[in-house]
């Protein structure tokens, strides 16, 4: 799926975060004014951490719109090589999916100065359903 298709499809996905999540974010920022970066973490099929680092100033945007990550993170073998047979790799366009933050996972990162982290969940491009990579080839 091309990124332009994702943009059109992403418009169909309603935000799943509510006012409680925004309040959680605001309180977190108030309690951690020194935080400047946020690591958004997605675990691949092998349990390897993947994701993006964003400025904390984009936290509300991430909460409202999510972030795009390639579905091919679920097509990697343990050495980080893309397994094309999954249908998620370069041969199929290496399409992005929207990832939404699990707000309750937001924490300051004690081993990394001025940083926080949160887990994200990947969603199907046309719905609010989580992307289930175990069903990607069926």
Image: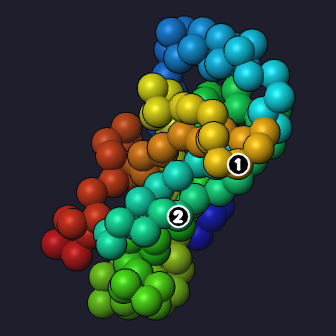
Answer above or below: position of 91 versus 130: below
The residue lying toward the viewer, choosing from 82 and 88, is 82
* Side of 119 relative to 65 (left or right): left
* Labels 1 and 2: the sequence-earlier one: 2
Is any part of residue 132 visible from this angle? yes
Residue 39 coordinates in the image, percent (x, y): 64, 48
The residue lying toward the viewer, choosing from 13 and 35, is 35
Give the residue displayed 54% in from the left and 9% down from the top: 19
Instruction: Tally the marks.
Output: 2
* Side of 138 relative to 78 (left or right): left
Task: State which mark lies toward you, 1 or 2.
Answer: 1
Answer above or below: position of 99 versus 3: above
Residue count near mark 2 (Cα–Cα under 10 Å), binned few <14, some 14–19, many ≥20: some
Residue 82 coordinates in the image, percent (x, y): 44, 87
The residue identified by callout 1 is 112
Is label 1 in contact with label 2 (beta carbons under 8 Å)?
Answer: no
For marks 1 and 2, give the CA distance: 17 Å
Give the residue displayed 70% in from the left and 48% down from the top: 112
Quarter of the rendering containing residue 52: bottom right
* Side of 79 relative to 65 (left or right): left
Q: Which mark is residue 40?
A: none
Answer above or below: position of 99 versus 34: below
The C terminus is located in which quarter? bottom left
The residue lying toward the viewer, choosing from 111 and 2, is 111
Give the farthest residue toward the left. 138
The residue lying toward the viewer, choosing from 70 and 93, is 70
Circle 2 — which element?
A: strand
* Side of 18 relative to 137 (left or right): right
The residue identified by callout 2 is 50
Quarter of the rendering containing residue 137: bottom left
Give the farthest residue toward the front. 111
């Amino acid at each position: 799926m091309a990124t332009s298709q994702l943009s059109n499809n992403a418009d169909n996905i309603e935000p799943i975060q509510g006012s409680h999540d925004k309040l959680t974010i605001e309180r977190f920022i108030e309690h951690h004014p020194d935080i400047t970066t946020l690591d958004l973490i997605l675990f691949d099929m092998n349990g390897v951490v993947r994701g993006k680092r964003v400025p904390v100033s984009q936290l509300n945007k991430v909460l409202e719109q999510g972030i795009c990550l390639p579905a091919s993170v679920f097509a990697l073998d343990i050495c980080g090589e893309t397994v094309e047979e999954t249908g998620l790799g370069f041969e199929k366009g290496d399409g992005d999916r929207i990832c939404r933050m699990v707000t309750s996972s937001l924490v300051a990162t004690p081993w990394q100065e001025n940083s926080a982290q949160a887990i994200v969940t990947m969603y199907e491009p046309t719905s609010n359903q989580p992307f289930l990579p175990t069903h990607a080839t069926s």
